Image (tube, rainbow, N blue to C red):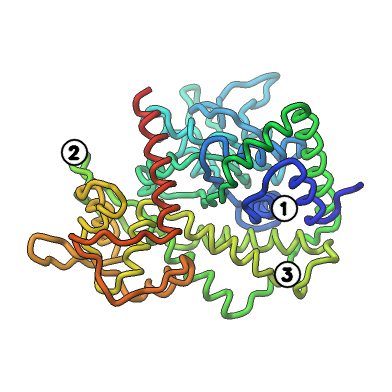
């Protein structure tokens, strides 16, 4: 059976994997397709727990040999080495086809390098995203490249620590956190797949290739994107909000609760550009799909929800936990009360709140010996709508331990996994 619709592709994946996240496969396909269009490059990072399946999804793209460029590791010389063979530049960037997409199965290991190498590698990636890369060499043969490259990366929550550290220099990746399936169901499925997993991986790679080849054969290069005024405004609002909240601040190296400097907040231009590139990818996927239920050029509710999720998932997870509490309690949140509810030290949580305060997201009021933080009201609606919060008039006081919302508990669990992973790397 030829794979010509997204529904068929998803059904084939469901035969092998437990798909707890309905958006992940569509997002990956839209990233591939969107990067073939004359629009902004799409750089998406899939964040999930170790062994959550993100590598399997990314590996399923490997037979797209004219598009996908798998990269297991990056050094400072990977993208541009400066070496020549038969008189030709052998740098990776000069070998890439038009519409190429980097595929990093484990980006965590790359950002866990020593600080000097990590800083240089991420600086190079930022230049590549921006479409122009220049590397000066000691021989005088400078390496110059212009073009467009997409990227798909997999990472654990540990990446938040490193991206926060370097975000003051400008982020390029947008993030998508995978919903996790039931642990025991996954274990049972692994046993079920154990005998012939190699054949199943090969089959899924063939299915992805069939779907992408068919879609691109039917694709119109100038994809019409029709957004209602309401949807367009909401996308712009979440893009503006998420870029402001994820913006970098410089913390004191010794006292991580003190903000030393606040650079200008990231503007929403890059995120908005990637939103629209992904949206056009969704539309292009639907051009050949007779089962698509919306009008030509329109996004489905599921696709709009994926874009909203990316905006919020791109916010560092600990700031997002703090935002959840700030949005819920109209009367404000005391530092100690929030720290107690999340099982974190007060000084650590104070650092999160100080960052949000320095970015203008919340403001601080001194009550006795305690700091109480209140959300800037213009952000409460957007947070509450996405996080499904019903704000209350009460405040979260120092001596209260509130009942944690189910979603709030998910954030806490994810942050604990992130801490465990970061500590493992730090102790290596």
Instruction: Check whether the beta carbons of the residues at disc 2 and disc 3 lie within 8 A of each other.
Output: no
Q: Is residue 96 left or right of residue 373?
A: right
Q: Earlier in the sequence, mark 1 or mark 3?
A: 1
Q: Residue at x 44, y 66 (%)?
A: 240
User: Above or below — where is 107 with respect to 81?
Assistant: below
**Quadrant for the C terminus in the image:** top left
User: Would you name the residue on which mark 3 appears?
Assistant: 224
Residue drawn at x 48%, y 55% as measured from the top left: 313
Alpha carbon of mark 1 to alpha carbon of mark 3: how far? 14 Å
Helix, strand, or loop for circle 1? helix
Percent position of residue 143, x then y: 55, 32
**Residue at figure coordinates x 52%, y 52% from the top left:** 174
Residue of label 2: 254
Q: Looking at this rendering, what residue extends furthest in the left direction?
A: 368
List x then y, in percent, for residue 403. 34, 61
Residue at image coords 39%, 48%: 167
Q: Position of residue 59 (x, y in %)?
A: 68, 36
Q: Secondary structure at mark 2?
A: loop
The 10 Å Cα crowd at callout 2, few under 14, some 14 to 19, many 20 or more, is few
- Residue 33 — which label? 1
Measured in 3D between alpha carbons, the distance from the residue under mark 2 to the one under mark 3, in whole angstroms, is: 52 Å
Which residue is nearer to you in this view: 240 or 315? 315
């Amino acid at each position: 059976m030829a794979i010509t619709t997204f529904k068929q592709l998803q059904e084939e994946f469901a035969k092998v994997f437990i798909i707890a996240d309905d958006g992940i496969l569509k997002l990956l396909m839209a990233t591939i397709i969107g990067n073939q269009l004359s629009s902004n490059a799409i750089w998406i990072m899939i964040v999930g727990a170790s062994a959550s399946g993100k590598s399997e999804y990314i590996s399923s793209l490997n037979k797209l040999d004219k598009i996908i460029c798998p990269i297991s590791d990056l050094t400072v010389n990977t993208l541009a080495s400066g070496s020549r063979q038969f008189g030709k530049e052998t740098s990776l960037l000069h070998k890439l086809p038009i519409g190429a997409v980097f595929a990093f199965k484990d980006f965590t290991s790359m950002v866990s390098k020593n600080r000097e190498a990590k800083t240089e590698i991420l600086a190079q990636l930022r230049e590549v995203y921006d479409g122009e890369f220049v590397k000066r060499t000691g021989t005088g043969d400078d390496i110059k490249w212009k073009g467009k490259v997409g990227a798909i990366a997999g990472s654990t929550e540990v990446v938040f620590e490193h991206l926060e550290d370097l975000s003051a220099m400008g982020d390029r990746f947008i993030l998508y956190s995978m919903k996790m399936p039931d642990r025991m169901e996954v274990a049972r499925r692994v046993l079920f797949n154990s005998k012939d997993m190699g054949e199943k991986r090969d089959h899924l790679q063939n299915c992805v290739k069939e779907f992408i080849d068919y879609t691109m054969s039917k694709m119109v290069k100038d994809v019409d994107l029709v957004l209602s005024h309401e949807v367009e405004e909401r996308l712009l609002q979440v893009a503006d909000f998420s870029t402001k909240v994820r913006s970098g601040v410089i913390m004191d190296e010794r006292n991580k609760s003190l903000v030393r400097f606040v650079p200008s907040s990231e503007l929403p231009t890059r995120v908005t550009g990637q939103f629209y590139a992904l949206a056009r990818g969704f539309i292009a996927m639907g051009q050949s799909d007779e089962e698509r239920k919306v009008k030509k050029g329109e996004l489905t509710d599921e696709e709009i929800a994926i874009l909203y999720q990316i905006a919020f998932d791109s916010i560092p997870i600990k700031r997002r936990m703090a935002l959840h509490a700030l949005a819920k309690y109209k009367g404000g949140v005391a530092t100690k009360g929030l720290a107690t509810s999340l099982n974190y030290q007060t000084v650590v949580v104070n650092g999160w709140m100080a960052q949000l305060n320095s970015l203008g997201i919340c403001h601080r009021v001194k009550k006795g010996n305690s700091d109480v933080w209140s959300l800037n009201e213009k952000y409460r609606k957007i947070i509450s709508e996405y996080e499904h919060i019903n704000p209350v008039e009460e405040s979260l006081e120092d001596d209260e331990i509130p009942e944690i919302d189910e979603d709030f508990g998910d954030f806490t669990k994810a942050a604990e996994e992130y801490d465990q992973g970061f500590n493992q790397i730090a102790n290596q």
